[in-house]
Image (tube, rainbow, N blue to C red):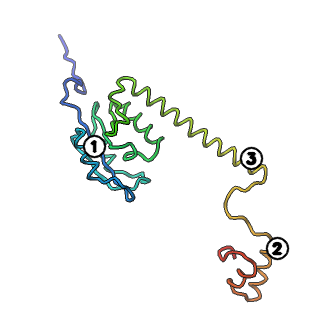
């Protein structure tokens, strides 16, 4: 009795050609128009293009998430430039590394990145870059914490508004009890109205 093995997923050679999904984003302050991005993505061979108008600092990008959701193993997401899809270097490296683990690829039309051309080295290379980015992030946090600690120990300024001295505080209260207006107190003490 023989059993026939059935695969969950088709072999790469059995699949229809891999899809290239494009993503174009235009921010409110961008100089790069959606039309020029879409044209560039079409010329580079994208089958489907997702378009979105979202500020670059926005973390909520529903069309990018939709584009990533349509990808199957072997497919690629294509951007005109990396800054169209990611807010910062750390997010970029993490996302590319996660996509590579799923067997997906990333390409830019400006030629900066094409993970398919890295072959089997792509996951290792981006894993290494992602790890280095994480180490750099941790070092920055450590330096900031050391700086705060040394400022506290030396009595240095940690930011925020400087406190007024007790003498000026007493003068403000005294003038206010005498019925002086806030503007006249400002003129006499030199303090800002928000401080008074």
The picture places residue 139, in percent across and down from the top left corner, at 61, 38
Name the quarter where the C terminus is drawn: bottom right
Front residue (pair 37, 165) = 37
Would you say 188 lies left or right of 42 here?
right
Residue farthest top in this picture: 1
Q: CA distance from mark 2 to mark 1?
A: 65 Å
In the drawing, what numbered circle is on residue 109?
none
In the drawing, what numbered circle is on residue 150?
3
Q: CA distance from mark 1 to mark 3?
A: 49 Å
How many residues crowd around disc 2 within 10 Å: few (fewer than 14), some, or many (20 or more)?
few
State the residue position of label 1.
22
Count of labels in the image? 3
Q: Earlier in the sequence, mark 1 or mark 3?
A: 1
Q: Is 171 situated above or below 86? A: below
Q: CA distance from mark 2 to mark 3?
A: 29 Å
Instruction: Assign a secondary structure to mark 1.
Output: strand
Residues under numbered marks 2 and 3 in contact, where contact means CB atoms less than 8 Å apart: no
The picture places residue 44, in percent across and down from the top left corner, at 25, 39
Instruction: Give the image quarter of residue 110.
Output: top left
Name the quarter where the N terminus is drawn: top left
Instruction: Assign a secondary structure to mark 3.
Output: helix
The picture places residue 17, in percent across and down from the top left corner, at 20, 31
In the drawing, what numbered circle is on residue 167?
2
Q: Is 10 situated above or below 52? A: above
Front residue (pair 191, 13) = 191
The picture places residue 92, in percent across and down from the top left corner, at 43, 40
Instruction: Assign a secondary structure to mark 2.
Output: helix
Q: Earlier in the sequence, mark 2 or mark 3?
A: 3
How many residues crowd around disc 3 within 10 Å: few (fewer than 14), some, or many (20 or more)?
few
Residue at (80, 77) in percent of width and height: 170
Q: Earlier in the sequence, mark 2 or mark 1?
A: 1
């Amino acid at each position: 009795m023989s059993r026939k093995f059935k695969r969950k997923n088709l072999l790469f050679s059995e699949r229809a050609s891999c899809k290239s999904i494009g993503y174009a984003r235009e921010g409110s302050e961008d100089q790069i128009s959606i039309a020029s991005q879409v044209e560039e993505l079409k010329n580079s061979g994208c089958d489907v293009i997702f378009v979105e108008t979202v500020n670059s600092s926005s973390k909520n990008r529903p069309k990018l998430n939709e584009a990533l959701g349509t990808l199957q193993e072997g497919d690629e997401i294509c951007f005109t430039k990396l800054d169209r899809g990611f807010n910062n270097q750390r997010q970029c490296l993490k996302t590319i590394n996660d996509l590579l683990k799923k067997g997906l690829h990333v390409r830019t039309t400006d030629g900066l990145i094409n993970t398919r051309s890295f072959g089997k080295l792509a996951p290792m290379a981006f894993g290494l870059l992602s790890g280095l980015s994480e180490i750099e992030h941790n070092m920055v946090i450590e330096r900031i914490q050391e700086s705060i600690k040394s400022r506290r120990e030396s009595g240095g300024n940690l930011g925020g508004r400087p406190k007024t001295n007790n003498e000026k505080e007493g003068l403000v209260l005294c003038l206010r009890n005498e019925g002086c207006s806030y503007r006249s107190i400002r003129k006499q003490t030199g303090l800002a109205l928000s401080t008074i």
